[in-house]
Image (cartoon, rainbow, N blue to C red):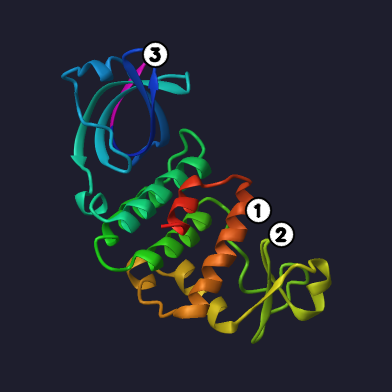
């Protein structure tokens, strides 16, 4: 068994037998890992963490072929206290880790996704809550291979000029001539197309400069919600809490 030391964000935890805990973690070096903390609920001295959702911790793992790795040590690094004092920010943070848990394969390193989680949680300290949510969604889809096609028509490969139609089913834009391939496609403005491209092509800090307001922002959020629901074929429970908050 290889012994590995790594940092990671808590995605999900649940009790295991009488004294232990299973935890889903997104780590810096290894991607998503499932860990077993034996005796955690007895208060073992090796575990100086409460395993709070979305907190950053340092772990020592015994790597094995079994998908459930033994965790011999877990220490809290930072638990993002400002996210626990604000309901909306707390719900967004929980959405982020639930989304990552649902979308990420086991033991598949992704430094980009790790950095995205970290940046999203840190920028939530500012007043960008709604914007951070859709920037996170766009970039998480991009890093996990679900990037929507936004430059050329997804059917004929023709360039989209001025106005296109977004097909959730086909995963990108259709030109007016190819609209027949998905009658449920929705018209999407040039402003929204440019905004999506800008977010995809720039780092998180630059993406925060995006100036979508009112109906345009709502339109983007609705498109992303439909796209995620269709292509991931899973429900993100935190989204319903967020929408009803």
Whether residue 36 appears in this view of the structure is no
Q: Quadrant of the C terminus?
A: bottom left
Q: Secondary structure at mark 1?
A: helix
Where residue 210 sits in the image (x, y, percent)?
40, 77
> What residue is shown with label 3?
17
Question: Are circles 3 and 2 on residues that touch, CB within 8 Å?
Answer: no
Which residue is depicted at the point 43% across and 64% down? 135
Query: Disc 3 or 2, which lies upstream in sequence?
Result: 3
Q: Secondary structure at mark 2?
A: loop
> What residue is shown with label 1?
230
Does the magenta run of residues contain 3? yes
Over which residues does the magenta segment extend? 1-5
Where residue 104 sits in the image (x, y, percent)?
50, 42
Q: Quadrant of the N terminus?
A: top left
Query: Disc 3 or 1, which lies upstream in sequence?
Result: 3
Question: Are circles 2 and 1 on residues that touch, CB within 8 Å?
Answer: yes
Query: Disc 2 or 1, which lies upstream in sequence?
Result: 2
Of circles 3 and 2, which is in front?
3
Where residue 214 sits in the image (x, y, percent)?
47, 79
Q: Nearer the viewer, residue 24 or 156?
A: 24
**Residue 169 got which mark?**
2
- 190 vs 24, left or right, is right
Q: Is 227 located above or below residue 103 in the figure? A: below
């Amino acid at each position: 068994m290889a012994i590995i030391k790594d940092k990671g964000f808590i995605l999900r935890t649940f009790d295991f037998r009488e004294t232990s805990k299973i935890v889903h973690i997104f780590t810096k070096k290894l991607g998503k890992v499932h860990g077993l903390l034996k005796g955690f609920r007895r208060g073992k001295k090796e575990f100086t963490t409460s395993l709070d959702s979305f907190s950053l911790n340092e772990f020592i793992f015994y790597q094995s072929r079994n998908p459930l790795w033994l965790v011999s040590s877990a220490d809290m690094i930072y638990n993002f206290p400002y996210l626990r004092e604000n309901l909306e920010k707390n719900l967004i943070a929980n959405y982020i880790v639930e989304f990552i848990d649902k979308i990420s394969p086991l033991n598949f390193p992704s430094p980009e996704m790790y950095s995205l989680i970290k940046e999203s949680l840190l920028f939530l300290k500012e007043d960008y809550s709604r914007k951070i949510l859709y920037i996170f969604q766009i970039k998480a889809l991009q890093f996990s291979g679900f990037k929507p096609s936004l430059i050329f028509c997804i059917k004929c490969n023709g360039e989209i000029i001025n106005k296109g139609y977004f097909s959730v089913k086909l995963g990108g834009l259709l030109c007016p001539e190819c609209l027949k391939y998905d009658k449920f496609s929705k018209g999407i403005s040039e402003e929204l197309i440019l905004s999506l491209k800008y977010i995809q092509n720039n780092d998180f800090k630059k993406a925060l400069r995006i100036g979508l307001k009112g109906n345009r922002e709502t339109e983007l959020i609705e498109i992303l919600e439909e796209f995620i629901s269709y292509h991931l074929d899973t429900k993100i429970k935190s989204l319903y809490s967020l929408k009803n908050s």
